[in-house]
Amino acid sequence: MAAEQGPRARILIVDDHEDNVEVIRARLEASGYQIESAADGQEALDRVRSAPPDLILLDVMMPRIDGMEVARQIKADETLPFIPIIMQTALDTVQHKVEGLGAGADDYVTKPINFAELEARVKSMLRIKLLQDELSAANDRLARVNEELRRVAVTDGLTGLHNRRNVETLLHEMFEHSVRLHEPLACAMFDLDHFKSVNDTYGHQAGDAVLQQLAEILKVSAREIDKVGRYGGEEFIVLLPGTVLDAAVTFAERTRQQVESHTFTFEGGSLRRTISCGVAAFPHPRIGHREALVKAADDALYVAKELGRNRVVRFDSPEFNQHSDVVDDQYANQLP
């Protein structure tokens, strides 16, 4: 919460001389401020970290930890908000003021204290804190808005998965990584079988619920390093880094079984559906670039649909080759 310039502002007085503390406390409390005190530097640091005040009136000369070090530690602690520090000292020299300001002090008063001057400096520092707190709050709001805009830009609004544009960006990065480090990269394309009949029979809200639940199954089935996206309509894509073709087929088959055994629910009813899947992986003699990897998985998905749906087909398998019209020159064997 932003500091106030009036009665609610909390001021921490740090001084090892109790008489000094009581004199300043009486004057500032009479002006409406809430006053707390600490008898040494360590106690001051503990108080500041547990409940940051709005302003610190800090004596330079103290046992254990002096005021200079207290100021340094407070200003270096990034978990703390901006807290103005007014140092009080009897050492009224340019050298000591420069040292104090370098340690993190925001202002100075010299002893014996002129209370009219002290109150004016307190009010000035609290105004600065108010402005700083308002600026910090505005920056926090801006950061949250920017993060939300970034999330919306890369996320499918219905399912919360990566959207197609972001999937293509991720694929570019992951494929380059795969080529550079000679690591495998697999791609699995999933399509919900007979989805049109869901919308036609139960309505689009039911269709949306089914897609959302399928997205959740895919997210749970995938590893943390895998990238799950909605590629369009009822078609989904999973990019599996460091995964050879056999392992990708195992993942796809496990996911297919999970969907087959799942009951999709929506307002007013429930239904069962299955998915078809095509799987491809790089490196492969017929896959020389990232677009070819996705096309290979998509062609395998098409064959899975042709063969009756609810199955997983791997690219370039005998099953694929027997039922596909795809020709070799569609897959250029040239690295990007």
Image: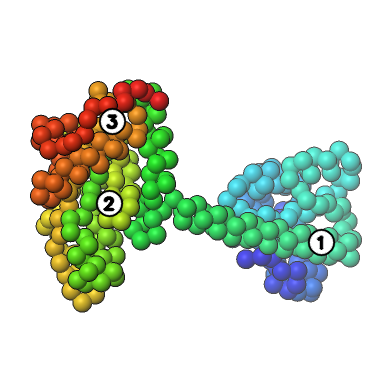
User: What separation in Å lies between label 1 and label 3 (alpha carbons)?
Assistant: 73 Å
User: What separation in Å lies between label 3 and label 2 (alpha carbons)?
Assistant: 22 Å
In front: 278, or 99?
A: 278
Figure check: 225 above or below 328 = below
User: What separation in Å lies between label 2 and label 1 (alpha carbons)?
Assistant: 62 Å
Which of marks 1 and 2 precedes in the sequence? 1
Q: Residue at x 89, y 42 (%)?
A: 93
| Mark 2 Cα-neighbour bin, 10 Å: few <14, some 14–19, many ≥20 | some
Figure check: 55 above or below 154 = below
| Mark 3 Cα-neighbour bin, 10 Å: few <14, some 14–19, many ≥20 | few
Q: Position of residue 249 (x, y in %)?
A: 17, 38
Specify the quadrant that holds the N terminus.
bottom right
What is the secondary structure assignment of the residue under circle 3? helix
Which of marks 3 and 1 precedes in the sequence? 1
Badge 3 is on which residue? 330
Badge 1 is on which residue? 124
